[in-house]
Structure formats: C-alpha cells, structure tokens
Amino acid sequence: MRVTTKGPLFAGVELGGTKCICTLGHGPDGIIDQLSLPTGDSEDTLATIARQIERWYRGPGFDALGIGSFGPLNLNPLHPEFGSIQQTSKPGWSGAAVLRRIAAGIDRPVRIDTDVNAAAAAERRWGAGRDTRQFAYVTVGTGVGVGFASGDAGAREHHAELGHVRAVRQVDDRHPSVCPYHTDCVEGLASGKAIVARFAGVIPEDIALNDPRWAAPIDYLGQLCHALMCHTVADRIAFGGGVVMGNPGLAPAIERAMRASLNGYLTLDAQPILVEALLGAQAGPLGTLALAQDARADAATPAQPSPRRRAAGGATRS
C-alpha cells in the first residue's frame, strides 16, 4: 500500500449489481489502494467489505467514509432501516443492512447514497458535469440507474428509481422484459441484461449500431432521457456503464431518439446534451470518495437542526 501526504485520506465503497469496489484515496489523482470483488451473497460480500474497511481504518486510517450502493435504498436517517436495501430484484439482498454492516465501529463521518448519485457527484466534481448547474448521470449496465447532482446537491432522504419508469413499447416489439416487476420499464427492456437477451446472448459490444435490433433499446433510453429533461431540464446528461462505454456512438443515437421524442417541446441547445462519462469505470468508485469528502465537510460545519443528520455508532450519517 502506497501512503502519501496529499491531504485528507478517504475510504469509499461502491456496491454494484455485479461487483463491489473498495477505494482508499485522496481523489482522482491520488488513489492509494483499491479492492474489487464480485457481488455475491449479501452476508459474505458485506463481511468481506467490512473487513477491508476496518483494515484501512486501523492503518493508515482515513478521515471519512462514503458508501454508494445499488438500491432501492432507505435514505431516511430517522428510520430504523436507514442505510438498508429495500425490495430488490437481486436475490438475497432485500433488507441487507449495508450501512450498519460496513460502518460498524468506524468512528468517522459517513455518508451513504445510491451508487448512481455517487457517480453523478464524481462526474460533476471531476468529469463530464464540471461546468453544469443541473447534471444527470445515467448508467446502462446490469440495470439502468439515474443519479443527479446540482449546485445544492446534498444528503437526501429519497432517491430516484427512474430505470423503472414505463416505456411506450414499439408496436412490433414483443421481446419479454427482464424486470421481475414490470413488463415494460426501461430497465426491463434496455438494460445490459435485456439487450443481451434481445441479441440472443451476444454482448452489446459485438453488435454494430446499425443493426436493427438496437432500434428498440435506443428508443426506450431516449424516452428515459425525455422524462429526465422534462423533470430537470438538465444542462448535460452523462452516460456510463458497460453498454454505452463499450459502444461509441450509442450516446448520440440516444440523444437523437430523445430529441425526436420531445418533438420540439423544450428549447434545447444545439450542442450535444448527452455525452459519455469522462471518468469511465472509475465514476462509481470516485463517487464514493466524493461522498466521503462531503461527509467530512458536513462534520466540520456547525450542526443545524435537521432530520437529515444523526449520529450512529459514533459516525455522522449525513
């Protein structure tokens, strides 16, 4: 492990549907150590992560901890299940006490948020959203997730699950949804898992974008961005995740679908609104360091009466 003197040191945990990444560092130019492990059984996975965080806590130590997790998450700090995963399609993870398991015994400020909100924070701080006021981050991988970052971004008690908004199916699209809850949500029809099924097991990177099978998922992701623009009027939407990052040209195709769907309703800049995430696969891990930085900053600010803050186990949960 390489230890530097570049200022405060932060620890972060990104829990994704496929893999988890633990990161120790100062920021994007100062990653000290990183551990990646597959997302398996919740008990074993959280125990492994907790051991790694405790090792870093005991030496070299860190100033704050950030946790970004797939959801849905309970982000109400007054609720007894704060920091736990709610009902999820991932077997064995519903009710998993992510915050309690990972941060037990860690006497440092802690912030937890969704993995996509964390990635959005990183991209706005260091990547594709640096010059924006309203910024959205969309990941298309195992699932479809949406995160937001703005000038007043902070701790939140609820989060968006826009990957599960309903899509208007193309009239000739009879392909089954992979979502166990919805027959026609964006995640069920246009996530990486859905696209692989649509392509009969061939990974998206191996399918040319002019293949007609792309038409439906591009349309559904364009509908998602239509909804995003109507909700936030974002200055920019950055796309991350393996599907988009592995297919250059997909983001512009989704933007064309979005603009066609909006049909002139909003006044949009001529410049592209949809771009690829600049931080790539590191957006999520760096997002957890951004959460940790925010937790440390909050802890240094005199506390104001707010239901969004509480101390638990010696750590500030913000």
Image (cartoon, helix red, strand yellow):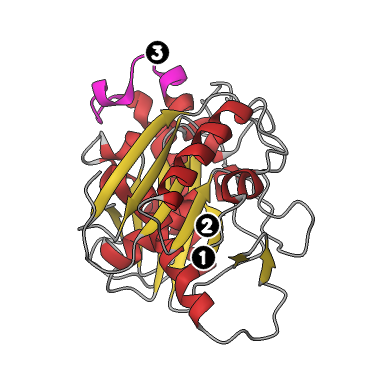
Query: Magenta stretch: residue 207 in it?
Result: yes
Out of 266 and 53, give the one closest to the viewer: 53
Confirm or deny contact between disc 1 and disc 2 (CB under 8 A): yes
Out of 123 and 260, give the one closest to the viewer: 123
Residue 112 drawn at (x, y percent): 56, 57
Residue 88 drawn at (x, y percent): 67, 36
Depth check, mark 1 against mark 3: the one in front is 3
Residue at the image position 60 percent from the left and 52 percent from the top: 105
Residue at the image position 41 percent from the left and 54 percent from the top: 11
> Badge 3 is on which residue?
201
Q: Amino acid at mark 1?
A: Cys
Which residue extends farthest front?
58
> Badge 1 is on which residue?
230
Q: For label 2, count other residues whose C-alpha is less than 10 Å away and answer few (under 14), some (14-19) or many (20+).
A: some
Image: magenta residue range:
196-211
Query: Magenta stretch: residue 176 in it?
Result: no
Q: Is residue 275 visible?
A: yes
Measure how far apart labels 1 and 2 are at the Cα level: 5 Å
